[in-house]
Structures are given as C-alpha cells and as structure tokens.
Image (cartoon, grey):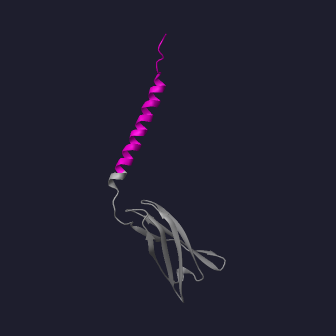
C-alpha cells in the first residue's frame, strides 16, 4: 500500500487557513483585553437639510468613538428661528466604533435658525 502525500497546494491552503485563524483569535483576544468600562462617547454631526414638500428633513449622524455599546439612544434636535421647533428620534443599537444615521423633520428651514442637538439618554446593554 502506498501512502498518499499532500501536494503543495494543500499545504498552501493549510498554511493560509492557519494564519487566518491565528489572526482572528489574536484580534478577539486584543479586543477583549482593551475593552473598558467607560461610558460611550457619542458624537453628533448635523448634515445639510433637504426640502421634501413643505418639510425640511435634517440628517443627523451619531458616532460612538469609544467606551461601551449604547442601546436605545434618544436624540433631540432643536431649531430656534422665528419659533422654536423640536424633533427627536431613537437609535436602537450603537456599538463601540460604529456610526448610525437618523433624520428629523421640521416645518421651518433649519438653516434660517440656530440648530442644536443632544443625546437625551441611552441604556447600558
């Protein structure tokens, strides 16, 4: 009986697979070791309003730069112009290092007034 030997292609596939598995395991260990108990650092960026019929839709981008994951992130956006108008929306899940986008609709043009946005609250998962 002759023994089957692996050819060079099988050894290359084995080596690449082993390298990918080691890299994935190393990343997961590093990520778990550097995870902190710090609260999320949520940054808000307001986009350019878009007119849709009689309303103005304002895109709002949220980024969680560091810290833990935030759930149920509630955002309030206020426009102070001729009158004060408020809008809010909720982001269900904002992981560490992630970015999510939401939209708020107003009757008045946000560019004609002062726009402010804030995170009202969030939950710790």
| Residue 102: % across, % down | 54, 69
Quadrant of the rendered image containing residue 104 = bottom right
Confirm whether the magenta stretch covers residue 75. Answer: no
Q: Residue visible at 54% across and 79% down?
A: 87
Confirm whether the magenta stretch covers residue 18. Answer: yes
Instruction: Tell whether 32 sits left or right of 47.
Output: left
Outermost residue, right side: 53
Q: Residue visible at 67% across and 77% down?
A: 53
Q: Is residue 113 above or below residue 38?
A: below
Viewer-proximal residue among 37 and 66? 37
| Residue 8: % across, % down | 46, 23
Viewer-proximal residue among 2 and 84? 2
| Residue 7: % across, % down | 47, 21
Instruction: Tell whether 50 sits left or right of 13.
Output: right
Q: Which contiguous range is marked in magenta?
A: 1-30
Outermost residue, bottom side: 82
Q: Residue visible at 42% across and 69% down?
A: 43
**Predominant secondary structure, magenta span:** helix
């Amino acid at each position: 009986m002759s023994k089957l030997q692996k050819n060079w292609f099988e050894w290359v596939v084995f080596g690449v697979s082993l390298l990918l598995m080691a890299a994935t395991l190393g990343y997961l260990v590093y990520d778990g070791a550097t995870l902190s108990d710090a609260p999320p650092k949520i940054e808000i960026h307001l986009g350019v309003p878009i007119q849709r019929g009689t309303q103005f839709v304002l895109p709002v981008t949220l980024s969680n730069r560091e810290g833990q994951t935030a759930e149920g992130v509630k955002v309030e956006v206020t426009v102070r112009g001729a009158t004060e108008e408020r809008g809010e929306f909720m982001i269900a899940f904002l992981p560490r290092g992630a970015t999510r986008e939401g939209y708020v609709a107003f009757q008045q043009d946000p560019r004609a007034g002062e726009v402010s946005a804030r995170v009202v609250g969030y939950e710790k998962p």
